[in-house]
Amino acid sequence: VRRGVFRSVEELEKAILDFIKKHNERPRIFTWIKDADTILSKVKKCTELLGTAH
């Protein structure tokens, strides 16, 4: 799917579903590298820098 060129929505949807199917055949456990406090601190910093979109 990455850097793909799709001529229709259906073609894109098929590529996504094929990717998911292939990925699910050999799933890997997701492991968080950073602790929750570090992640939330970065989210807070980004929110403050960007402000709200409303």
Image: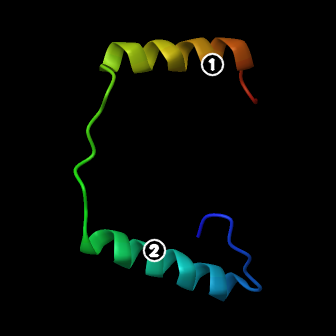
Image side of residue 24 versus residue 18, left or right: left
Task: Tell me the residue at 29%/32% (across/down).
Answer: 32
Q: Which of 52/31 is in front?
A: 31
Classify mark 2: helix, strand or loop: helix
Label 2 neighbour load within 10 Å: few <14, some 14-19, many 20+: few
Image position, residue 12 (x, y; %): 63, 79
Image position, residue 36 (x, y; %): 32, 20
Classify mark 1: helix, strand or loop: helix
Task: Tell me the residue at 73%/20% (across/down).
Answer: 50
Q: Quadrant of the N terminus?
A: bottom right
How far is mark 2 from mark 1, CA to CA?
32 Å
> In the rendered image, which quarter is residue 52 located in?
top right
Image side of residue 14 versus residue 29, left or right: right
On screen, residue 51 above or below 54: above
Q: Amino acid at mark 1?
A: Thr
> In the rendered image, which quarter is residue 5 located in?
bottom right
Q: Which residue lies under the disc numbered 1?
A: 47
Q: Which of 3/50 is in front?
A: 3
> In the rendered image, which quarter is residue 24 located in?
bottom left
Q: Which residue lies under the disc numbered 2?
A: 19
Q: Quadrant of the C terminus?
A: top right
Q: Earlier in the sequence, mark 2 or mark 1?
A: 2
Image side of residue 15 versus residue 31, left or right: right
Q: Amino acid at mark 2?
A: Phe
